[in-house]
Amino acid sequence: MPSKTLLLCGALGLIIMGALVGTGLFVSRDTHLVLEGKIQRVRASEVRAGASVVIADVKLTNPSGYPFMIKSADIEIIAADGKTLTGRFIPEVDAKPMFSVLPALGDKFNPTIAIRESVKPKSTVERMVATVFEHPIGVIESRKGLVIRFKDVDGPVSELR
């Protein structure tokens, strides 16, 4: 049977280790860089024969203690046949006039998310992501799913489904 001194030292060592691990977790609680949020609405319209534009309005929250700087914002469509379709990002300068040319899109509710835009720590923003796909509108409208992927300049990737 171990002595009382050994048991006391072992218990004290476990308490100290637990306190160190707990302190480490507490200090690093805001360091996980991620964007959370939801897709508020998705609209699509045919641009020309065989090409369509998809507009997604999103609400993004950065719960971490560091800014999330956008490197890329991509929309992927999961087609009815299971294939993944990737489009090309449309910047604000091109997205803004689209709404007057394509009335089927309706109104423009939010500014387009910009490359190198920073979502501040502990903040929420509403943005639009516009993407053009080289696929007919029928393929876009019959999709199984939609994924919006935001990549930070330092590497972390966040997805909204």
Image: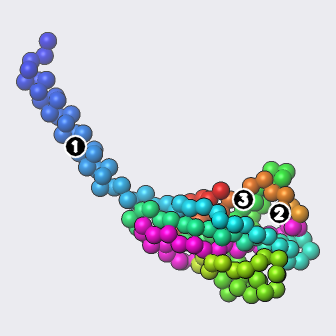
Determine which of the numbered discs, if any, sits on residue 160 in the image.
none
Per the image, the residue denoted by label 2 is 140
Per the image, the residue denoted by label 1 is 19
Query: Can you see residue 68?
Result: no
Q: Nearer the viewer, residue 107 or 147?
A: 107
> Of the residues shown, which amino acid type is indicated by label 3?
Leu
Residue at the spot 39% in from the left edge and 59% down from the top edge? 31
> Of the residues shown, which amino acid type is indicated by label 1?
Ala
Q: Quadrant of residue 110?
A: bottom right
* Mark count: 3
Vertical position of residue 129 compared to residue 149: above or below? below
Residue 139 percent location from the top left of the image: 86, 61
Q: Nearer the viewer, residue 141 or 80?
A: 141
Vertical position of residue 25 compared to residue 125: above or below? above
Horizontal side of residue 115 vs 68, given as left or right: right
Q: Earlier in the sequence, mark 3 or mark 2?
A: 2
* Tag 3–tag 1 contact (CB < 8 Å): no
Residue at the spot 14% in from the left edge and 12% down from the top edge? 1
Secondary structure of the residue carrying tag 2 is helix
User: Would you say residue 127 sits in the magenta stretch?
Assistant: yes
Secondary structure of the residue carrying tag 1 is helix
Q: Quadrant of residue 65?
A: bottom left
Vertical position of residue 1 compared to residue 154: above or below? above
Per the image, the residue denoted by label 3 is 146
Residue at the spot 42% in from the left edge and 69% down from the top edge? 121
Residue 122 percent location from the top left of the image: 42, 67
Horizontal side of residue 152 vs 3, given as left or right: right
Gap in Å between the C-alphas at discs 3 and 1? 44 Å
Gap in Å between the C-alphas at discs 2 and 1? 53 Å
Label 1 neighbour load within 10 Å: few <14, some 14-19, many 20+: few
